[in-house]
Each structure stands twice: as C-alpha cells, then as structure tokens.
Image: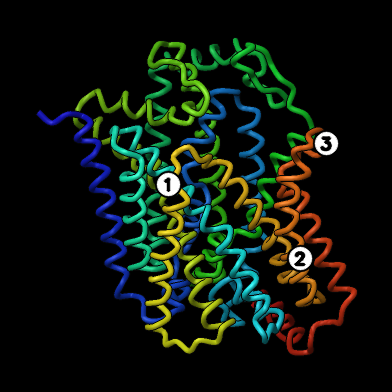
Amino acid sequence: MITSQTIVMLTIGAYLLFMIGVGVYFTKKNNSAGDFYLGGRQLGPFVTAMSAEASDMSSWLLMGLPGVAYLTGICDAAWTAIGLAVGTYINWLIVAKRIRVYTHNLGAITIPDFFSKRYDDKKNILNFTAALIIIIFFIPYTASGFAACGKLFSSLFGIGYMPAMIVSAIVIVCYTALGGFLAASTTDFIQSIIMTIALVVVLTFGISSAGGFDAVVANAQQLPGYLSLNAMHDMSSGEATHYGFISIVSTLAWGLGYFGMPHVLLRFMAIEEKEKLTLSRRIATVWVVVSLAIAIFIGVIGYGMTKAGAFEFLEGSSSETVIVVIAKLISGIGPVAAVIAGLILAGILAATMSTADSQLLAASSSVAQNVLKDFLGVKLSDKATMTVARLAVIAISVVAVFIASNPDSSVFEIVSFAWAGFGATFGPIVLCALFWKRSNKQGAMAGLIVGAATIFVWKYVVRPMGGAFNIYELLPAFILALAVNIIVSLATAAPSAEVEKNFSEYEKALHV
C-alpha cells in the first residue's frame, strides 16, 4: 500500500518536473538577449502581476509570517504586512508605468542598463557599479532560497540537508538557464496559484481542526497582547510587551524596499503594453493584501489548533513550520488529501523557487550584459550573450550553494539585509531617474555608494547601540541616499542636452 508520505513525495516530484518542462518549452522562444533577460516585453497583465508578487514574497509568506503570528500574535506581523502592502501598491502606481515607458524609449533591458542610458554614462561606471551591487546582494539572497528549500525537504522526509538543498538548486537552475525570463515569469505565475491554493486549504482545514472560528478567536483573546497592534505576546512570561512608535516605523520601512527590487522592476519593464499595468496593479494589490492577511491568520489558527490538541506547541524557529505541520495532518486523512498536502508543501517550495529564479536571472544578466559587454567591452553576439548568461546562472548558483552549505544560517537575516541593500541603493536612484529631470550621473553614483555604505554601517555599528538607533537599516540608508542624490545633483553640472531631451520625450510618451 502506498503511504501518504510517498504520495506527498510523488506530488512534489511531479511539480518539480513540470517546472523543468516549462524551462525546456521556453528555450526555443529565446532568440535574443532581450528575450532571455526581458521576455521580449511580451508579458500579459495577469502573468506580470502574479509573477511579480510571487518573486517578491518568497517562503517568508508561507513560513516566516505565520510563524511570527503564531508565537507573538498579530502585531509585528501585521505592521510588516501593512508596510509591504502599501509599498506594493505605491510601487505599481507611481513606478510601473514610468519605468516601462522610459526603458522602452531608451532600449534598456536591465536595471543597470537603464541607469547607464538614463544618465548618458558613456564609460559605463554607473552601469558597472549597479551590476556589482546586484551581484553582491543577490548571491547571498539566492543562497537563502536554496537553504530554505534544503531545510524544507530535510525536515519533511528525513534526508540530509545538503542533498536536499543541491537537488532544489539544480531544478531552479535548469528551468532558469534553459528558458530565461519567460520561463521564470511563467513558473512564477504558476507558483503563485499553488501558493494561493496552499493558503486557502490550510486556512479552511485549520479553522475546522481548531474547533471553529469562534474558538480560534477565544483562544487568542486569552493571551495578553496577542490580538493587539501596539503590543506583542511573550510566550515565556505570558505577558504583553509594548510595541512602540520606533518599532512600528522601522517595520513599515520594509515597504520602501520595493522601489529598488530589480526582480520586481523587471516585471514592470516586460509587460507587453503600458496600458495593461492598471489591471496588473489591481490584481497584484488584491492578491498581496489577501495573501498576507490569510498568512497572519494561519499563525493565529495554528495556536488555536495547538490548544485543541491537534499538535504540540511549536517553540522558537520551529514556529515557522506551522503550515508544514498542518500539511502533515492533512496528508493522514487519505490518498486525495495526501495529494492536496503535497500541493501545499509544493506551495512553500514554489514561494522560495519563484524568488530564487528571478534573482538568478537578474544577477546573471548583470554579469553577461552589464559587466562583460557594457563595461569591459567584450563583443558578443546575441547567441553568445545568452550562452554566457546561462553559464553565469550556473556559476552564481555554485557560489550560492557553497554559501548555503551551513544549515544553521539564518534565512530571515540574509533576506532582511539583501532587501535593505536593494531598497536603499536602487530605490532612491530609480525615483530620481523617473521623476526629476535635474537628477544627474554624479548624484546617482553618490546615492548608490552612500546607500550601500550606510546599510553596512547602520546594521553592524549603529543599530547594535539599541534604543532610538534600533531602526531597520533600510530607512536611514534610503533617506541618506536620496538626500545625497539630490544634493550632489544640485551641486554639480546639469545633465546634458541629450539627457534632458530623452527625459522630455519620456514624459510625453507617458501620456500618449
């Protein structure tokens, strides 16, 4: 008789093979570097919206957020979700259309390429610096995704961490290297559907197992601060701890990161028509708000299930496995339920893979297009460029696997730091490039350097001081980088007539 665990493994295996199949299918559709990096700007509104958000959320949506809510209540999780939801909406509202139009007018196919052409960076110094920042922050970010996959398979099936992590990395590398941007975007779209199914099924089953909605709320209300927005519950003491203004501002600052996320901005650049971005924005915003809300409530439901005796209390980092635990309970109901449980676990895997593939693609494009072709001046045909990009995907993955080889590394810490890095370095320059005609190359370069430097200094020198300095490094770094960009731009020569002409044409194109 086939066991429920075997059915779960077969379901996940089928899902992984399907992802590779998507990569093989899109291999034939890549006829140029623009196709490989940006899908020939052919994405429809649904794929644009859902692939952008799937690549954004990662396993944090299905593991980190429910885990925080399970242990401490809704406060920290809710403020983080609010910051992300607001950031998502504003990014779609004010950045999406502008960067789609401007990059199309300039013929830019990567973010560093956009910076270089926007500021007429003939020596490609700005291009190279931006590409270097992408590589520096995306390699460990990708490693965190590999690590999350390894930990998931290892805990589920009792296999070694390294084999589990390497197999996951190979699958991601295969469909990304084969199919490029279209494969990554299509698989991300599929993965967003799987993630949604996982959230809905877990929500429904969890409420039923916890004794109903009223029982879930009643159990949560018994814990001081658990359902508050200005306090957190401390499980060890059984008391509420104050969640102050500085903590709220620091948590909301996560939303600033969206303005500088290369893998999200690339989706904006790739949509087939700028007019369809309005529909994409609505789809993306609704999905993000609903998904974040359900993920938080699953944490609360998980505590209710613990009180109902469905499973033992999950302490510390094990709280992040609450959906995994619920999926295991579902798998024991019967064969059909085991398939559903397999899809839920595939959803967690999908959340991680959808982020890792986009990061790999952005990093590889920086190596092949921005460093080799633009900065070093290596002459490559479109076919050769795609070959180099594929080799870069493999090389970056090897480094990421090495970084992820330690199973005790903190996935959340790596993600938090990389998110801050992109938000503070690219966010201000993207906003200035899109909204301010007077912004120049010197200001952009100064902003990149100050943003990156502040991230490191604030995290490792200033923030450990605590008190008022205990603010997520993204916020002070973003503010300083933006200020420096403005000050240096005003203190140096105005952009050339050609740059100003391009900006005026871009503004006209926005309203056509």
456 vs 497, nearest the viewer: 456
Q: Could you tell whether 447 is left or right of 356 in the image?
A: right
Which residue corresponds to mark 3? Answer: 468
Q: Position of residue 156 (x, y in %)?
A: 32, 33
Q: Amino acid at mark 1?
A: Ser
Which residue corresponds to mark 1? Answer: 405
Q: Label 1's element?
A: loop
Instruction: Pick whichever of labels 1 and 3 is earlier in the sequence.
Output: 1
Q: Could you tell whether 336 is left or right of 430 in the image?
A: left
Q: Is residue 249 visible?
A: no
- State whether residue 223 is above or below residue 112: above
Q: Amino acid at mark 2?
A: Gly
Instruction: Pick whichever of labels 3 and 2 is earlier in the sequence.
Output: 2
Residue at point 48%, 37% (across, down): 408
- State whether residue 311 is above or below residue 327: above
CA–CA distance between discs 3 and 2?
24 Å
Indicate which label's residue lies in the foreground, 1 or 2: 1
Instruction: Pick whichever of labels 1 and 2 is earlier in the sequence.
Output: 1
Across the whole image, how many numbered discs are drawn on residues?
3
Name the quarter where the C terminus is drawn.
bottom right
Q: Residues within 10 Å of mark 3 (few under 14, many from 20)?
A: few
Q: Could you tell whether 330 is left or right of 82 in the image?
A: left
Q: Amino acid at mark 3?
A: Ala
Q: Is residue 147 visible?
A: yes
Q: Position of residue 52 (x, y in %)?
A: 51, 57
Q: Label 2's element?
A: helix
